[in-house]
Structure formats: C-alpha cells, structure tokens
Amino acid sequence: MFKPIPAINSLIEETTIKQFQEMMRSGQLTSRDLAKAYIHRIALYDRGGPALNSVLELNPEALFIAEALDVDRIRKGPRGPLHGIPILVKDNIDTGDMMHTSAGSLALVDSYAPEDSFVVKKLREAGALILGKANMTEWANFMTDNMPNGYSSRGGQVLNPYGPGVHDVGGSSSGSGAAVAANLASASIGTETSGSILNPACNNSLVGIKPTVGLVSRRGVIPISHVQDTPGPLARTVEDAAILLGAIAGIDEQDVATYSSEGRAYGDYTQFLDKDGLKGARIGIASSFAERLGDEYRGIFAAAEQALKDAGACLVDVDMPRPQPWQSLSLVYEFKPAINKYLARLSPGVPVHSLKELVEFNESDPDRMLKYGQTILIQSEQTSGTLTETEYILGRAREEEESREKGIGRALNQNNVEALFFPNLMNAAISARAGYPSVSVPAGYTEAGRPVGVTFAGRAYSEPVLIRFAYAFEQATKARKAPAIV
C-alpha cells in the first residue's frame, strides 16, 4: 500500500540511487512506491506550487512497469544499480512506447518514435524505469536567435526551482535539469551539442556529464550536428551521474561514432570514484577566464580553487583561447541533412518530413509556433544540405584545430596537466567543438541564491579522470543544497 505523501516525500528528497537500492533490498521501498511518489511530487511542484513545468509527459505505463520490475527483483534479483529507478529523458530522445518525441515542437506533438533510441534501450536493459519526458528548449535551442532557455511551443517555459521566474534555468536540457534538482526523478538524460548539459547542471546545482562524442550512441536522438551531439546524464551527485553513464556508454553497431569507444568505454564508472582523487593531481586553470567573471562569481571560483589545493591538487596556469560563442556556423550547415534524415522516417500522420516543411508548418500558425521566430531554421534551410560548401569545410576544419590542437590539447600537453578547470561552463563551446568530455559540479550560490558550478574538462575519453576529480571536489566541498520549493 502506498505510504502517505508527507512520509514518502521526506524519504525521497536528495536520496541517492545507491540509497534507493538499499531501501528496496530491505523491503522499505518498492519501485512502484518510488514511481508513485515522484508522480505525486510532479503534481505538487511541477504542475502545482511553483509550477516548474519541467516534465512534459508521464509514461502511462509507469506504475505497471514499476510493478513488473519489483516482481523481476524478487524472482531474479536486481539487474544492477538502476533496477527500478525512475529516470526522465529529454523530449528529443526516442522512446518506442506510448510517449511522444517532439523536441518541444508543436510540429511533432503527435509523433511517436518507431523504436527506442539506443540510450533508452540500454536504460531499460539496466532495469531503469523511464518515468517520462522532460520539457526542453525547442529544437534544442537551435530554432532562433533569441529563444529563452527552457521555452518550447509544446511545453511552455521551464522554471528554475532555485528561483522560479528569477534565475535562468539553463538550456536546452532545461526540464531534465530542473526536474532532477527539484527531486521529481532520481536522475535524467539530457543531450548536448554545445553546453546543453553543462548549462542546466550549473544553473540547477547538479552534476552534468557531457561525454566524449562517440562514448554514447546518438541513434534515436533528434539531431543538430553529427560532429557534436551526445546524450549524457544529469544527477544530484557525481556517483549517480557515474552510474547512469555506465549504463548508456558503449558500442552501437548502428552508430559509427561509437566504434572509437572500443576498449575505452566502461560499464561501471563508479570504480573511478575516489574521495582522495585530487591528491597529487595537476590541474590547469586559465586565469584569463576567471578574470571575465563578476566579483561575486570570481569569489566563488576562488574558493573552488582553494578547495582543490586543500585536497592536494597542484594548480597550473594555462593559456587557453578566449571563450567562444556556443553556436558556430558549422552547426547551421550540419543541421539540415541531420534533421531531414530524422524527419523523413516519421509516420505519414506527422505533418512535417523535412526542414522545409517544418519552416512552412511553423509559418502557418505564427502565434502558437513562432513566439520567438525561427531565424536559425530558415538559415539552415538555405544551405545545400550536402555539406559541400567551402565555408563549411574550411570552418569545421578550423574549429577542430582551434579546439583540439591549439586549444585543449595544447593546454594539457604544454603544461603536463591531467585536466582543465573552468568557472561554470565557460569551456562549453571549445569542448563541444573538440568532441571532448566535461563534468560540471555544484560550487556554491550567489547572495540571490542562484546556483554556480565549476567544470572539469579533458581530452577524448578522459571521463575516468574527470569523474575522479569531480567526485573528490564534491566530497571536499559538499556544495549542493536542495532548492526550497515547498
């Protein structure tokens, strides 16, 4: 029988995946209890209370699936650390079930994916319960130049639980971030092309792992760029994020980018958690980045630097290119062939099957679908879609060189450091263009209560090192505080 709401609320707030597993092992909690508790919290705080608007759609079969997982646990034992754990996925990730996949667009409001994305397939195999779809910035914030983080025509505006309507919620995995921060799910999956995991992580006091492109399959994710897109976890702790990453990493025979992860992907990233992991570590810091911060943010970052030193790390000043705008011209060219391929396979009942049709569909009802315009969609539609333009070829090659050889690689090699450390997500664009990983961790709050994060970044497939450093930093600082949304 379901426990009273106040009791179950206190039981699940800020509870980790490992703690949930222990409760289920001891019989204190079932997966059905947990799923129902999160659904009640969604009613209380996502639709009621501060009305965060972070959950776009609930899985109609959630409680039945949870019961089946409970039975499976009794008969066979848990499949692993995610068995029976409710997870939200961003609305641009395919689920071949009764939930839609729309990228937040009214153009795809009736679109059902024909099958699970590879990421969702892996989560289900690990025993995770896909609780629902998270709201997001429409088309992963690749629709127009002035789209607010967290807004979609289908789902409306996502709010930050640390300051609803006051603090930026971060984009484009905004719902994935806000929901986990508010304890509406155990963890979530977001996607990043340039900052869309790191941004909501920093703004919602979460841990976000943006993996190396190719560590996690892109199949079944509504795309922007074949070069930069990657799914990744958002969680309240480094351990929870590491558990999730281990479940979704690995080779997908239908995604060639994952072939390079052979021998470099791990099914268990928790093996790299080490509270003393910063002892003797050499970490690079670009002081020029910190100089661009306001006084309050600079103070928080200085305290984070001191925490690294106190934990035994050696900090080395490194030379890095100036922070870059999140969007590059290369994405405008890459979006058209990628989105055309995705839309073309959708059912005949969906009204758009190409970027051209999407632009026309939006123009047919501008009051509902073009609140902020579609300048980027139009710009991308005007490209050839063949990636043969000289501007694109030379531009992408230049971005790769500047982000890898002249950027992250140069800073790591010249200074013999293991990772780079940045305020908030100031490395997001350069790491994204390189296809390299980053891990964001909570670092503190402004006087106004806005969360502030820090990010560890490194070369391709350095997730074990970054997770080790992030965990040691998290354990040394214990910076995260739950939002006061009640």
Image (cartoon, rainbow, N blue to C red):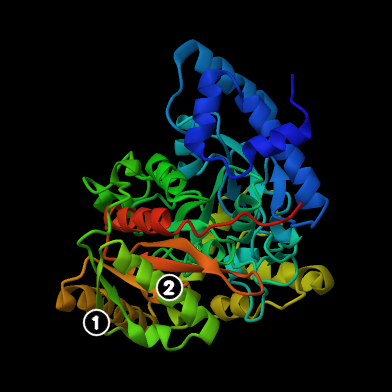
Residue type, label 1:
Lys
- Left or right side of 181 for 395: left
Crowding around mark 1 (Cα neighbors within 10 Å: few <14, some 14 to 19, many 20+) is: some
Q: Could you tell me if residue 342 is visible in this image?
A: yes
Q: Which residue is drawn at 79% across and 44% down?
A: 43
Furthest-top residue in view? 75
**Dot label at residue 476:** none
Q: Quadrant of residue 36?
A: top right
Q: In which quarter of the image is residue 356?
A: bottom right
Q: Is mark 2 on a helix, strand or loop?
A: helix
Q: Which residue is drawn at 34% across and 59% down?
A: 212
The quadrant of the image that shows the N terminus is top right
Which residue, given by chain and number where applicable, does mark 2 sit on?
303
- Mark whose residue sits in front, 2 or 1: 2
Q: Is mark 1 on a helix, strand or loop?
A: helix
Could you say where residue 421 lies in the image, as x and y percent from the top left?
A: 35, 71
- Left or right side of 189 for 52: right
Q: Is residue 404 above or below residue 263?
A: below
Could you say where residue 360 lies in the image, as x and y percent from the top left?
A: 71, 71
Q: Could you tell me if residue 433 is visible in this image?
A: no
55, 99: nearer the viewer: 55
Residue type, label 2:
Ala
Instruction: Report, in whole angstroms, how far the alpha carbon at label 2 lies from the one at label 1.
Output: 29 Å
Q: Residue at x 80, y 74 (%)?
A: 366
334, 230: nearer the viewer: 230
- Left or right side of 183 for 295: left
Could you say where residue 272 lies in the image, as x and y percent from the top left?
A: 29, 46
Q: Which of marks 2 and 1 is nearer the N terminus?
A: 2
Furthest-front residue in view? 310
Crowding around mark 2 (Cα neighbors within 10 Å: few <14, some 14 to 19, many 20+) is: some
Could you say where residue 431 lies in the image, as x and y percent from the top left?
A: 36, 71
Which residue, given by chain and number where applicable, does mark 1 sit on?
406
